[in-house]
Amino acid sequence: MRALQAADPWGVDHLTIIQAPEPRPGPGEVLVRMKAVSLNYRDLLMINGMYSRGSATGGSVTPFSDGCGMIEAVGEGVTRVKVGDRVATLFFQGWLSGPPTLEKAMTALGSPIPGAGRELAVFSQEGVSKVPDFLTDQQVATLPCAALTAWRALFEDADLSPGDTVVLQGTGGVSIFGLQFAKAAGLRALITSSSDEKLARAKALGADHLVNYRQTPEWSKPVREATGGVGADFIMEVGGQGTIDQSLKAIRIGGHIAIIGVVAQGGAGINPAVLIGNAAKMQGVFVGSRDMFEAMCKAIELHQIQPVVDKVFPWTEAKAAFAAMAGGEHFGKIVLEF
């Protein structure tokens, strides 16, 4: 069986396909034939040697936390799933419920646990979950990280009500899922992008307000205008240092800023006086638990939400897929197909 592997010297150009022994499931484990995986910015950092939680593979990395596959075999004692079930891999193999802990955080796929970027993989039965039948394999592969991160930020951590205004930064996977979930929940959505074409696509998905942040760098002003001067109830902050200043200016008194990514570079940092002055809440978000994932899947099925898969590559062309991600070419998610 073949698998993707990154190791020193790190970098997309050094990502290789290796031959590996065919795995077999032990007690409580399942063997999954992968059908698709999706890319996250974390994966790009990982293969560039810039992300680690203490890899258990001697310095090499099998990337990808987010996959869809079919159960081919089960070990002794497996009861959650059966042969023939289609499942998603869970980002955290050991975070089943409750609040996050360091122990749970150390069970992430890709690093430190070898990820889903391989033809066959063994996972704990606790680390996979059945998924809505109406979704394609490609769509299922987008759910474990990007979708769940957006879901948790909006509905597990924030306290939002129908009619509230949410700001979604950019048109990557987390923000587009945030837009789809927000509209299903009756929230008003404002989305930012540097591309008018991507903003038009976001409008077709239901975005109520659009801001091109290249044309309007002070995008907090149109947020204030759209909310009658009050400010947004919620901001999905994916830029980091380069965008946090505008988020602090755009949030309402007592609002919620979900810190999700650090894609943007440079710019102002956090001004504690501003945060104190508007009594806003700022919370870091890193994906979620299995309980959250399964609640999200119920909502996706109820509302028939179609994850946005923008680009699909054969898994053997992972380098090209990462180049597309690095170039910011995508709207929604990029997927590799086995």
Image (tube, rainbow, N blue to C red):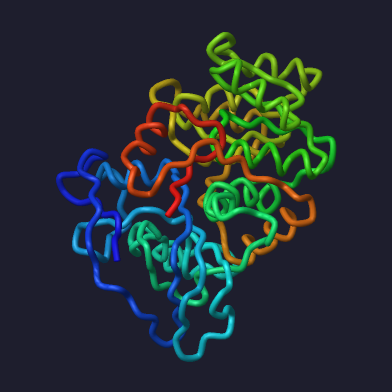
Residue furthest out toward the left: 9
Does 79 appear above or below 284? below
Q: How many marks?
A: 0
Residue at 51% from the left image edge and 25% from the top image edge = 243
Residue furthest out toward the bottom: 76
Does 95 appear above or below 64? below
In terms of image quadrants, where is residue 308? Answer: top right
In front of the other: 65 or 330 = 330
Residue at 68% from the left image edge and 20% from the top image edge = 210
Residue furthest out toward the top: 215
Q: Position of residue 319 (x, y in %)?
A: 31, 40
In front of the other: 178 or 225 = 178
In front of the other: 42 or 332 = 332
Q: Quadrant of the N terminus?
A: bottom left
Does 56 appear above or below 300? below
Q: In which quarter of the image is the C terminus?
A: bottom left
Taking the image as shown, residue 251 lies to the left or right of residue 259, namely right
Q: Position of residue 112 (x, y in %)?
A: 33, 61
In terms of image quadrants, where is residue 114? Answer: bottom left
Q: Position of residue 207 (x, y in %)?
A: 73, 28
Q: Where is residue 199 in the image (x, y as percent from the top left)?
A: 64, 21
Residue at 81% from the left image edge and 18% from the top image edge = 228
